[in-house]
Amino acid sequence: MKRQEDFEKVKEEGKLFQAEAFAVAIQKREDSEQTKFGFVVSTKVSGMSTQRNRVKRALSEAVRHNLNLIGRGYNMVFLAKKSIIKKSTEEIMKEVESTLKKGLFRE
């Protein structure tokens, strides 16, 4: 997902699930196309762009490694919390995996 309207629609109409270092807004679409992902790491999380980009890369990599756990036809937006900055990439990946294994996005 790239357009801000898409992100806002998922945040408003989707279900929000909380993890320790991030929240996930999940919206079920009316099709069976590939699931689309978005990652939001605001300047409130960190003022340093290098840290924000590291978090986005870690979240993206975690999703890529766990695509088999995710069904088709969803829009998912990961919303980083301040505590995510203190976590290593491995810790972020484990938290994403455990959140997805719970199957919270399946209806």
Image: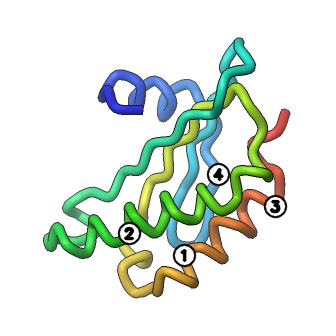
Q: Mark 3 to mark 1: distance in Å?
A: 14 Å
In the image, what residue occupies the spot 79% across and 52% down? 69
Disc 4, SS: strand
x then y, percent, for residue 19: 62, 65
Q: How far from the left and from the top, in percent, is residue 53?
A: 28, 65
Q: Are marks 1 and 2 in contact (CB under 8 Å)?
A: yes
What residue do we see at 15% from left, 73% from top? 48
Whole-angstrom CA distance, mark 3 to mark 2, is 20 Å
Residue ID for mark 2: 55
Identify the residue at image location x=78%, y=38%: 71
Q: Label 2: how many residues lie within 10 Å, few (<14), some (14-19) or many (20+)?
A: many
Q: Earlier in the sequence, mark 4 or mark 3?
A: 4
Of callouts 1 and 4, the N-terminal one:
4
Amino acid at pointer 2: Val
Q: CA distance from mark 1 to mark 2?
A: 8 Å
**Mark 2 vs 4: CB contact within 8 A:** no
How dense is the environment of label 3, judged by Cα within 10 Å: few (below 14), some, or many (20 and up)?
few
Q: Earlier in the sequence, mark 2 or mark 4?
A: 4
Does dot 1 land on a helix, a strand or a loop?
Answer: helix
- Residue 21, compared with residue 41, is above or below; it is below
- In this figure, which residue is indicated by the disc labeled 1? 92
Q: Looking at numbered disc 1 in the image, what kind of residue is underneath it?
A: Ile
Residue sitting nearer the eye, 82 or 67: 67
* Amino acid type, residue under disc 3 in the picture: Lys
Residue 92 position (above or below residue 96)? below
Which residue lies under the disc numbered 3?
101
User: How far, Cα to Cα, is label 4 from label 3?
Assistant: 13 Å
Mark 4 sits on what residue?
A: 17
**Of callouts 3 and 1, the N-terminal one:** 1
Above or below for 38 versus 51: above
